[in-house]
Image (cartoon, grey):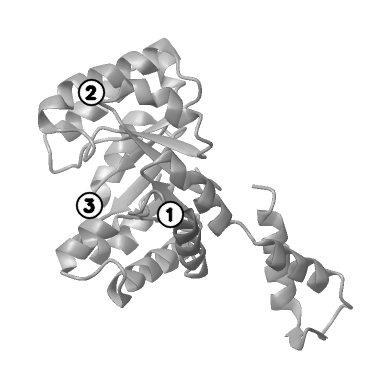
Amino acid sequence: MLSSAISYLFVPASRPERYGRALAAGADRVIIDLEDAVAPEDKDSSLKQLIAALSAGMDAPVHVRINADDSFLFERDLAALAALPEVARAGLSGVVLPKVEDPASVMRIRKLLGEEIELVALVESALGLSRVRSIARTPGLSRLALGAVDLSFDLDAEIASATIDHAYATLVLESRLAGLPAPIASPPLSIQDPEGIETGARRLRSLGLTAQLCIHPAQVEPIHAGFLPSDELLVWAQNVLTSDAGAAQIDGQMVDKPVRDRAKRILAQRNH
């Protein structure tokens, strides 16, 4: 399942009173989190609260981040989602698999939950990164994402480093080769810094990513602003496409077919 979503907003499964607020925040996807955002003692009650909310009917479909496949909770989560009644399944739009290292786990989810949902594999370790080619080409995978905090810890590297940028570039390349949408970036760590979040999103877009995870509703708007084409870029694209056919110059830049193709892509993105 291909996706043009830009923002993926997490909300803890243990806070059902926040589900509606998250859905109203303007994010393209809302991810109810059963994994890192939930304390171990709250795992069982959080799953029950999630199932109850899905069964009662959500304002919009949601994604669910299940527990990693190295946890006994992985099969528990899958079984609970697979057993949802039809009315509740209508509220499940996707599954996020954290700390993915084995393509078999991706296939297991797809087998149990069917072809209709978006299935996102979150790469968060050196081993996962080393296997990303086979993960990306797993039948049924929808999209790759990077968890920079866990990966930087595993590699003993800074989040803002060439090492993590290399990991992003690897996911961008393998997504392209596998025919997947461009990958999803790790969430911003700051919350009340819209300019910084937008700048960071614009930088990630320049690396070839086209979406970003969010941990707070305040991050959604600046992420959209950073990933969508700027007004200046839209004007440039329009000028390119209205120029004479063949090779030409605009503002001192040579314009030929590859440049025109890029301009078409930019203008197509404005209607997100």
Is residue 254 in view from this perspective?
A: yes
Q: Taking 159 as reference, is 37 above or below it?
A: above
**Is 179 in front, or is 11?**
11
Q: Would residue 232 be found to the left or right of residue 59 on screen?
A: right
**Picture coordinates of residue 38, whole percent (x, y):** 20, 33
How crowded pointer 1 is (Cα within 10 Å; few <14, some 14-19, many 20+) is rated as few
Q: Residue at x 20, y 42 (%)?
A: 68
Q: Position of residue 67 (x, y in %)?
A: 21, 37
Locate residue 134 relative to residue 175 in the image: left or right: left
> x and y percent of residue 79 in the render?
24, 24
In the rendered image, which residue does mark 3 sit on? Answer: 102
Q: Nearer the viewer, mark 1 or mark 3?
A: 1
Q: CA distance from mark 1 to mark 3?
A: 36 Å
Pair 2/3: label in front: 2
In the image: residue 182, left or right of residue 19: right
Residue on which the image places disc 2: 46
Q: Left of 56 or right of it: where is 123?
A: left
At label 2, which amino acid type do we have? Answer: Ser
Q: Residue 174's x, y, as percent?
A: 40, 65
Q: Amino acid at mark 3?
A: Asp
Looking at the image, tell me whether mark 2 or mark 3 is earlier in sequence order. Answer: 2
Q: CA distance from mark 2 to mark 1?
A: 30 Å
Task: Return the residue nearer the eye: 182 or 82.
Answer: 182
Tell me the SS state at disc 3: loop
Task: Residue under label 1, please give it.
Answer: 193
Using the image, determine if residue 12 lies above or below residue 143.
above
User: Who comes first in sequence, dot 1 or dot 3?
Assistant: 3
